[in-house]
Amino acid sequence: MNPEHRKSSFTGPMNEITRFAPKAAKATSILRALALMVLASLMLTLGACQSIRPLSDRMESKYSLKKRKTSISRLRPQGPERCSVPVQVSARAFRAMLDSIEEARGVKYRFGGTTPEGFDCSGFVQYLYNRSFQMILPRASNDLALVGPIIHRDRLQPGDLVFFAAGDEITHVGVYLGNERFAHASSKAGISISTLSQSYYATHFAFGTRIIRVE
């Protein structure tokens, strides 16, 4: 066989492969780009679905997955003791808490405040539960939100704690009084009573928790 003919027969297919290689690479790049576009579209869709869910549903789901505290400490003459929550308290002690709320109405808001000289929201709750039920509660509202079972808005009872969120973080807490009303330390009005139906609180309501059960 003519050597030139052999050379032509051998290099011909290689030339074809070389000629088609850029097209194959281009097709692979296009497929990869399409796959990334589909993945990005799916992530956007999932994110949109998540944002459409009511804030209260998102917050209940988020905080139900966190490790929740099922007991708290109470001060006793013999020393602190651990109690499972919700703790049963007397109607008399609960009325004493309501009286403490009335006494505190009008006290100015003070960031970091835990006394009648000035309260912030979690400081007020901590003060009430310590004074009325001798309970030692976490200081920050975000930590308070991890104590006791989560309660949906339509199942709230007087004495439950109600939490509010900005974004996906707990930012405010109050004490539920019944009939949509709750007591809290408002940054604008100090110790006051508001309702869950008010625009801001309706929009930012996260969930309730139950730490006490009234006899």
Image (cartoon, helix red, strand yellow):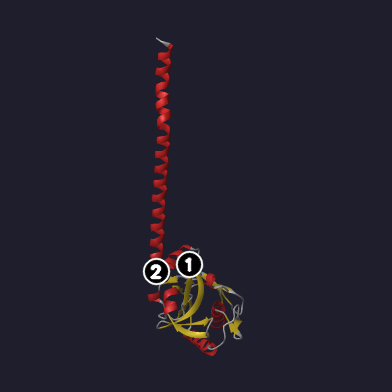
Task: Identify which residue is drawn at 42% across, 32% down.
Answer: 21
Count of marks placed on residues: 2
SS for dot 1:
loop
How crowded is the residue under tag 2: few (<14 C-alpha within 10 Å), some, or many (20+)?
few
Gap between marks 1 and 2 measured at Cα? 11 Å
Residue 134 screen position, x and y as percent:
56, 80
In this picture, residue 74 sits left or right of residue 193: right
Is residue 1 placed above or below 205 in the rendered structure? above
Residues 72 and 157: in front is 157
Residues 57 and 175: in front is 57
- Quarter holding the C terminus is bottom left
Circle on res. 54: 2
SS for dot 2:
loop
Is tag 1's residue or tag 2's residue first in the polypeptide sequence? 2
- Quarter holding the N terminus is top left
Task: Identify which residue is drawn at 52% across, 86% down.
Answer: 101
Q: Residue furthest top?
A: 1
Task: Identify which residue is drawn at 42% across, 13% down.
Answer: 4
Query: Given contact means CB atoms under 8 Å apart, are the residues at marks 1 and 2 in contact?
Result: no
Q: Quadrant of residue 128?
A: bottom right
Circle on res. 168: 1
Residue 117 screen position, x and y as percent:
61, 86
Residue 205 screen position, x and y as percent:
44, 74
How crowded is the residue under tag 1: few (<14 C-alpha within 10 Å), some, or many (20+)?
some
Task: Identify which residue is drawn at 37% across, 76% down.
Answer: 154
Residue 59 screen position, x and y as percent:
45, 67
Residue type, label 1: Asp
Residue type, label 2: Pro
Circle on res. 183: none
Is residue 137 placed above or below 6 in the rendered structure? below
